[in-house]
Amino acid sequence: MPRTPIIAGNWKMHKTPEEAVAFAQQLAPMVEPYDNVERVVAPTFLALGAVAAALDGSPVKVAAQDGHWETSGAYTSQVSAAMLQPFVDYVIIGHSECRAYLNETDENVNKKARAILTCGLSPIIAVGESLAQNEAGDTVDFVRGQVSAALDGISADEMGRVVIAYEPIWAIGTGRSASGEQADAIIRSAVRDTVCALYDDAVADALRIQYGGSVKPGNMEEFMTQPNIDGALVGGASLQSDDFAALVEIASRVKGA
Ligand code: 13P
């Protein structure tokens, strides 16, 4: 079964609600023709409701950038997966910026993944090694550990809704991306093979795995031609509608299911 490519724009802490809505309205018709690609935008929490309303009826889906595992409670600053449920299809968790600045642990990523699935949503679980780990040759072991921890207790059925994003930290926002072949090799050995060992061939074959880290129109084709890469989690280039649309067009042409 071919895997439908998924291109998600992680807007991070960019765009006010007004700017986010205007951008979504501009982007939607530009990417509308590419039905063989899943198209997703992830605004800030503050803009989620307005962007979801603006994209209602459009093929562009909405993701949140985080989601707490408890339904509600005394967790100042947090938003629960259950609260996100009416607005989004996806929730990004485990992003390296959350791991670095917000004390996101593997254990929390797992609790969030389970809560997101229980709410009927899909987690996009971000994993990836630091430059020091990469240079020490620890990438595969480290990413394997992140993947195994994130998926603890998740059923084979639920895996059909999970997306994993491999984002080497040294490639995020640096303009320095992994090569397509490097990224594909790590995605295969550290992510797909790990999922195969934890579940089975069918679950591993169906799993969609994105690459993230300085993806732009100029290098998108190199990633999309790799056998194990099923899309991209994009920061900077997703903030420009022309670039975002170009990424979707390339994914559709090279990889469209
Ligand atoms: P850049 O595309 O800006 O490198 O960011 C990648 C990223 O962190 C997406 O989640």
Image (cartoon, rainbow, N blue to C red):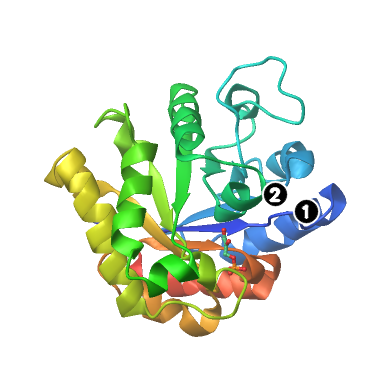
Look at 30% across and 66% down and name the residue there.
186
Label 1 Cα crowd, 10 Å radius (few <14 / some 14-19 / many 20+): many
Write down the residue under mark 2.
43
In the rendered image, residue 52, in percent from the top left (x then y), is placed at: 68, 40
Q: Are marks 1 and 2 in contact (CB under 8 Å)?
A: yes
- Name which residue type carries label 1: Ala
Which image quadrant: the C terminus?
A: bottom left
Give the image quadrant in which the ligand numbered 1 is located. Answer: bottom right
In the rendered image, residue 93, in percent from the top left (x then y), is placed at: 53, 43
Q: Is residue 165 above or below residue 131?
A: above
- Name which residue type carries label 2: Pro
In the picture as drawn, the residue positioned furthest to the left comes out as 201
Would residue 4 be visible to someone looking at this image? no
Write down the residue under mark 1.
20
**Is 27 placed left or right of 110 in the picture?**
right
**Is 100 placed left or right of 15 in the picture?**
left
1 or 2: mark nearer the eye: 2
Look at 71% across and 22% down and name the residue there.
75
Label 2 Cα crowd, 10 Å radius (few <14 / some 14-19 / many 20+): many
Look at 59% across and 80% down and name the residue there.
175
Q: Tell me where residue 181 sits by quadrant.
A: bottom left
Would residue 204 be visible to someone looking at this image? yes
Helix or strand or loop: what does disc 1 sit on? helix
Q: CA separation, marks 1 and 2? A: 7 Å
Helix or strand or loop: what does disc 2 sit on? loop
Q: Tell me where residue 243 sits by quadrant.
A: bottom right
